[in-house]
Image (cartoon, grey):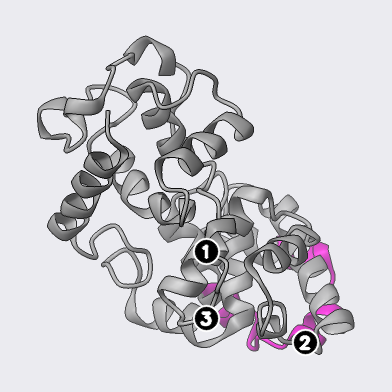
Amino acid sequence: MENKDILNALQNYEMTFGTAGNIFSGGLLEDAERDFVMRDSNAFLFGLIADQSVKAETAWSLPYKLAQRLGHFSMQKIAKESSSEEIGTLLRIKPALHRYPGNMGRYLWSAAERLTSEYDGCAENIWGNVTAMEIVERLEAFSGISHKKASLACLLLWRDLGVEISDKENIDIAYDVHIRRIFLRAGFCEKDTLKDVTEAARRLNPKFPGYLTSPFWALGRNICRPTEPLCGQCPIRPFCARRLDKTENLRA
């Protein structure tokens, strides 16, 4: 197996599905929702925090819908005039904006408080003129942001928001369920751990491991599905060990 052959297959697949699997340029969000998270750095951060246990489109539409329910999107007002319970209540109103409104309310209120006290109320100050390693370290200090989310943020900031990041070799692949499923089935790694998946991605594409997040995520969501995978349509089938029994418990 040659890494360059796998990368070429992934690049060709990206050209095929185009922007369909891209949360910011595909059709997963309404225009107003997408514009909000791309224009407002605090909305981007809230979308990132919300991106767990729900579909990507649910998470990234949350900031816009929450702002509508709040009547504003001021971090200072959220931190000083609201509470985590109030945010959770707003998320819980039907149609609920998240599967776990209580936890998410605490995470988002805490984020507003940290942004206000440490970053002058603006998330853009988190990633301005710093390295990928520093961005990850700063993001991981926020409640609800794991290494997976911080790595994903670096990719999205560079790819979609035009943030300059020089040390792309330090942007790791996101430890996402779709990606984990492919890595185990294909035989890229032996164990479903953050360490094993991360190291496998670094071996596949050492200059920019995080680049692999987008094509593998789209591949796992659309083709290498939890059940009845479309193996005949898979661009990396020639390199896949097809160990389907390894991923019986890995479902989105």
Q: Is residue 70 left or right of residue 97?
A: right
In the image, residue 77 lies in the stretch drawn in magenta: yes
Please say if 215 is above or below 63: above
| N-terminal-most mark, 2 or 1 | 2
Residue furthest to the top in view is 245
The answer to whether any part of residue 96 appears in the image is no
Extent of the magenta region = 65-88
Q: Position of residue 201 (x, y in %)?
A: 47, 41
Q: Is residue 79 left or right of residue 244?
A: right
Along the line of sight, the residue nearer the viewer: 229 or 182? 182
SS for dot 1:
helix
SS for dot 3:
loop
Q: Amino acid at mark 2?
A: Gly
**Residue on which disc 1 sits:** 168
Q: Position of residue 249 (x, y in %)?
A: 48, 18
Along the line of sight, the residue nearer the viewer: 18 or 86? 18
Please say if 206 is above or below 198: below
Along the line of sight, the residue nearer the viewer: 225 or 194? 194
Q: Which image quadrant is residue 76 in?
A: bottom right
